[in-house]
Structure formats: structure tokens, C-alpha cells
Amino acid sequence: MTRIIMSGCNGAMGKMITDLVAKDEEAQIVAGIDIADDGRNDYPVFSSILDCDVEADALIDFSTIKILDDLLSYCEEKGLPVVLCTTGYDEGQLAKIEGAAEKIAVLKAANMSLGVNTLLHLIRKAAKVFAPEGFDIEIVEKHHNQKLDAPSGTALALADSVNEAMDGQYEYIYDRSQRREKRGKKELGISSVRGGTIVGEHDVIFAGEDEVITFSHTAYSKAVFAKGAVAAAKFLTGKKKGRFDMADVIAAK
């Protein structure tokens, strides 16, 4: 049984994870962290992680980058593994996360979906086959009209996965509207669409002469991210220190 502290328990993802874990015989949320307790949870809720006195095996954070310092301090003091699902960290915060991984187990991923992280693995292999044969590579991502950032963190992770497989040969091109020239062979185009209530769609396109291969992932519900976060918490349980990502979770299955 993995005992979980849920940071951001009253947010949309926190509520989804709470409902998911309630049906999971291998996990239990033993405490929550949020600004206020709305009374819906059957576990204690603390307004600050520093006030939490409940023993746990892992912490999942789906809250805000503003509390990162307190989260890391708490987890380091308790020797508690942490799954960081919040996005938007600056360079200084990313350095702190890497530093914390020298003391505790830390898992951070741009996308918690098991499907997306399997896709990252697959397109590395595909790039090594198609790129040397002259295939152009494009990434198209689609999200709801409330999403603030573009391109998505997942689109960038997909691009990085391709580029790492090809030793950093590619230049990311986000906008061709000011370019009146043929596409360069070492361009990697990344396009964003925002509209409606699209949860998340990502296409990685390998376009060659007379054939196109497209790898696609569609999230129909944010539940895919909740499932991945819980799987990550289970994976980290018992680990003392180190920097992990969702590829490690998948490899362990």
C-alpha cells in the first residue's frame, strides 16, 4: 500500500487523483495540502506542507510553483519521494529540483500520461530510421482555449526526444509566417492550435517522398495524467534518492 500526500488536493487534478485512488487497492491518500479545506475529502487537509504531520510513502504535487521551496524542504527532511506534476518552473527552480534529487527520490515529467511517455520512446527510434533518409519532421499540438502557454510542454518534450536521438541537429521553428524560403532539412516545425475544450492532442509527423508516417496521441480526459501520477508515486515508493522520469516508470512495468 502506497500512502500518498496530495499537494493541491482541491484543484481539478487533485480531486481527480483523490477519486482515482479511492478505487485503488494499492494506494491511499493519507493527507492533502491546499489553501483551504472544502470538506469533501476523507483525509486531513493542511494549508501548508510544513504543518503536515502525517506519515506517507510519497508526495504528489499538482499545485503551484510558488510552494516548491517548502515542498522540497519538507520532503528532504522526511526523506519522502516526490512526484512533481506542476509545470512552469524557472531555471533556478529547476536547479533546486536537480539538487534535491541528490538527497531524495524526485520524479518530474512534462506530461504524466503513460501513453505520451511511451510515444517519446517510440519517436526516438523512429527518428533514427527516418531522419537519415531525409524525412521532414513536424509536430502539431492542440489544446483547449484556456491554455496559456504555446507550444505545450509535451510538444517541446517530443521535439527534444527527436533532437536527442539525432545529436541535436535540428532547429525548432515555431512560426513560418515571416519566412519566404524553402523548408530547411534540419528544421523541426512545432505548431500550436487552441480551441474549444480539447484536452490534448499531439501528432509527430515524419514526411518523406511518397509516404508519411504519423505518431498520434489523444487525451480524452485529464484522468490519463492522474493515472500516470499515481503510477509514478507507486514507482518511487522505497527509493532513497535519484532523478527519475516517466520513462523509468514505463521501463519498470
Image (tube, rainbow, N blue to C red):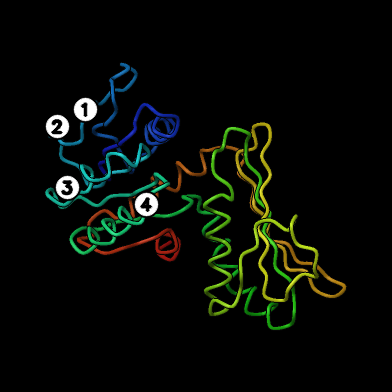
Write down the residue under mark 1. Answer: 46
Q: Position of residue 99 (x, y in %)?
A: 23, 61
Question: Mark 4, residues whose alpha carbon is within 10 Å: few (<14), some, or many (≥20)?
Answer: few
205 is higher (above) or lower (below) than 66: below
Closer to us: 1 or 196: 196
Pointer 1 or 2: first along the chain: 1
The residue positioned 39% from the left and 44% from the top of the image is: 86
Q: Assign the C terminus to one quadrant of the image.
A: bottom left
Write down the residue under mark 2. Answer: 51
Give the Cα distance between marks 1 and 2: 6 Å
Find residue 90 and name its label: 4
SS of the residue at dot 2?
helix
Question: Mark 3, residues whose alpha carbon is within 10 Å: few (<14), some, or many (≥20)?
Answer: some
Give the Cα distance between marks 1 and 3: 16 Å
Q: Position of residue 137 (x, y in %)?
A: 70, 68
Find residue 73 and name its label: 3
Residue type at mark 1: give it: Phe
Location of residue 33 by image quarter: top left
